[in-house]
Image: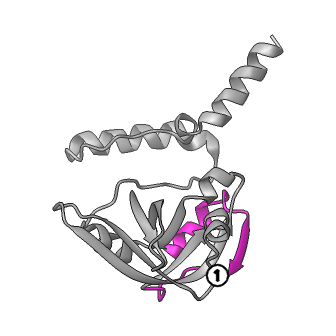
């Protein structure tokens, strides 16, 4: 689950943040984008705990163990807020991403946004060459069950990867 919200530390200063609801045990298997970590990872028991992007934490002076308040507009149009404790601070290859990232367990993210579903399902395959076959199978199931899912391959979502491949593909022709 992914949506925009507001982070506050109670000092009347707020930050617009990207709130990502995750299943912690599954996220560590598929997310290689997170490269640095301080504190502890979120777990199944991290009900009202969050991980913040390193730049966000640094810019706001937030440390592990600090209390933060997340707010957003719910699916019904009401403002919701959630008090959380910072459990960890994470970094990636992108300082811009790190300056807006807030990760929390999926159930807490659903509670805050007042939703029951998810926006994205990620499948981790054992071999890249299986991608086409899996997409065809899921597309068939999507049609048979009228799921109305948008199905995309990882490489269609990886803009930077595509740019590099296109650049070097044209360069070495």
Q: Position of residue 110 (x, y in %)?
A: 31, 70
Indicate the quadrant where residue 167 lies: top right
Quick check: 108 above or below 67? above
Q: Position of residue 75 (x, y in %)?
A: 21, 60
Quarter of image, res 143: top left
Work out whether 140 lies above or below 1: above
Relative depth, front residue between 38 and 32 = 38
- Is residue 114 shown left or right of residue 137? left
Q: Is residue 118 left or right of residue 157?
A: left
- Residue furthest toward the right? 172
For image coordinates 75% across by 14% down, the residue present is 170
Q: How many marks?
A: 1
Identify the image quadrant of residue 37. bottom right
**Is 100 placed above or below 104 here?**
above
- Numbered range of the magenta stretch: 23-47
Q: Position of residue 119 (x, y in %)?
A: 35, 54
Q: Position of residue 23 (x, y in %)?
A: 47, 72
Q: Which residue of the protein is positioned furthest toward the top in this rendering?
A: 173
Q: Residue at x 39, y 42 (%)?
A: 137
Asked if the stretch drawn in magenta spans residue 112, the answer is no
Q: Is residue 1 visible?
A: no
Q: Is residue 172 above or below residue 104?
A: above
Q: Which residue is mark 1?
A: 63
């Amino acid at each position: 689950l992914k949506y925009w919200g507001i982070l506050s530390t109670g000092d009347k200063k707020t930050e617009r943040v990207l709130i990502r609801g995750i299943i912690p045990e599954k996220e560590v298997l598929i997310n290689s984008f997170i490269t640095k970590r301080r504190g502890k990872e979120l777990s199944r028991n991290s009900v009202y705990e969050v991980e913040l992007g390193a730049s966000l934490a640094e810019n706001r002076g937030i440390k592990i163990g600090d209390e933060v308040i997340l707010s957003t507009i719910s699916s019904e149009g009401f403002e919701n807020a959630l008090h959380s404790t910072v459990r960890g601070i994470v970094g990636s290859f992108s300082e811009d991403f790190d300056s807006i990232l807030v990760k929390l367990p999926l159930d807490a993210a659903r509670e805050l946004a007042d939703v029951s579903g998810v926006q994205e399902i990620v499948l981790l395959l054992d071999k890249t060459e299986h991608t086409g076959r899996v997409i065809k199978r899921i597309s068939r199931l999507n049609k048979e069950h009228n799921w109305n899912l948008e199905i995309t391959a990882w490489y269609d979502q990886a803009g930077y990867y595509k740019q590099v491949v296109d650049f070097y593909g044209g360069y070495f022709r």
